[in-house]
Image (spheres, rainbow, N blue to C red):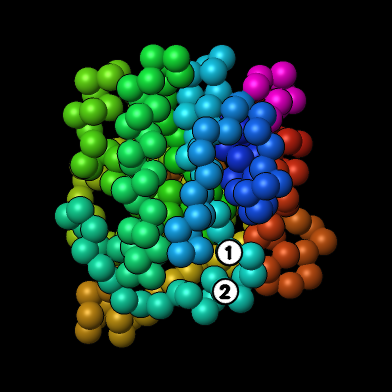
Amino acid sequence: MENKEILNAAAISQFVYKKENQLPLVYTNPDGIILEKIKYFDVDDTEAVVYHDHDNSTLYVAFRGTSSLMDVLTDINFGCSQFYGLKAHKGFVKAYKKISSSIMDTVRRSIDDEKLNTDKVIFCGHSLGGALANLAFYHAVSSYSSIFRDANVTCKLVTYGSPKVFNARQMNSVVSDIFLTHAVRLTHGDDIVTTLPKYSKFMKNVFGIEYIHIGEHLSVGEDPDGDDAFSEHSLKTYIKALSENMII
């Protein structure tokens, strides 16, 4: 994935924390590339936004994270749900399914829209938004692969400070390879959210539950002034580190 795409996705992942009426209709990135807002979603407090980069024919689908890290800790539990041949964190699956059909309908319409001329779709998000982006990406490549293939559209994923989503026992090499070649997960220092849900020997041995990360891992540094367990989770911290360390 190109550095400029990672930075664009980070900016849009930050936009989705805003209220709908505060979202920019048009965003001009530092390189002067214009991204246009296509649609905003809010279904039972699961939120997402779609922007399109006309110059690079790229559609960005960003999911909103949590407004409070305590929400993340409260929402993390060990239950699994079936998800298109895999098993995933049931709380994340429940949140994603509220919005999945609307998201995929918009993606399909964007691919079919000749004016947009989309040849790449990037799912992205921070924190919980990253977990939902994981599910959306896998949903797209597992259930809509023929649509992407026939339209010659590439599907990618980039997340910032995402918790673990998928259960290890149902993972296979085909899915792992798809994530390794098309997905990037970014972490910053000791961001505690990326360690959740915590490993439990009891849950693994008794219930077969062991949540894992998949995809290429990219560390963007750490905050030497961090003085608590959550100081490195802020998306602003990620964006600052990316801006300082990435060459566009």
Front one among 50 and 179: 50
**Residue 176 seen anywhere in this rendered image of the structure:** no
**Which numbered dot is residue 71?**
2
Examine the image and state in which quarter residue 51 appears: top right
Query: Which residue in the rendered view is the most extreme toward the right?
Result: 225
Q: Residue at x 21, y 64 (%)?
A: 82
Q: At which x and y percent is residue 213? A: 40, 56
Front one among 210 and 162: 162
Q: Residue at x 48, y 24 (%)?
A: 58
Q: Dot 2 surroundings within 10 Å: few (below 14), some, or many (20 or more)?
A: few
- What is the magenta segment's predominant secondary structure? loop
Q: At which x and y percent is residue 20? A: 63, 49
In the rendered view, would you say 109 is above or below 61? above
Q: Give the range drawn in magenta.
A: 27-34
Q: At which x and y percent is residue 137? A: 36, 43
Please give left or right for residue 83 compared with residue 14 in the image: left
**Considering the numbered disc 2 on the image, is that residue within a helix, a strand or a loop?**
helix
Q: Which residue is drawn at 61% across and 26% down?
A: 35
**Which numbered dot is residue 66?**
1
Q: What residue type is labelled 2?
A: Asp
In the rendered view, would you say 106 is above or below 185? above
**Residue 125 seen anywhere in this rendered image of the structure:** yes
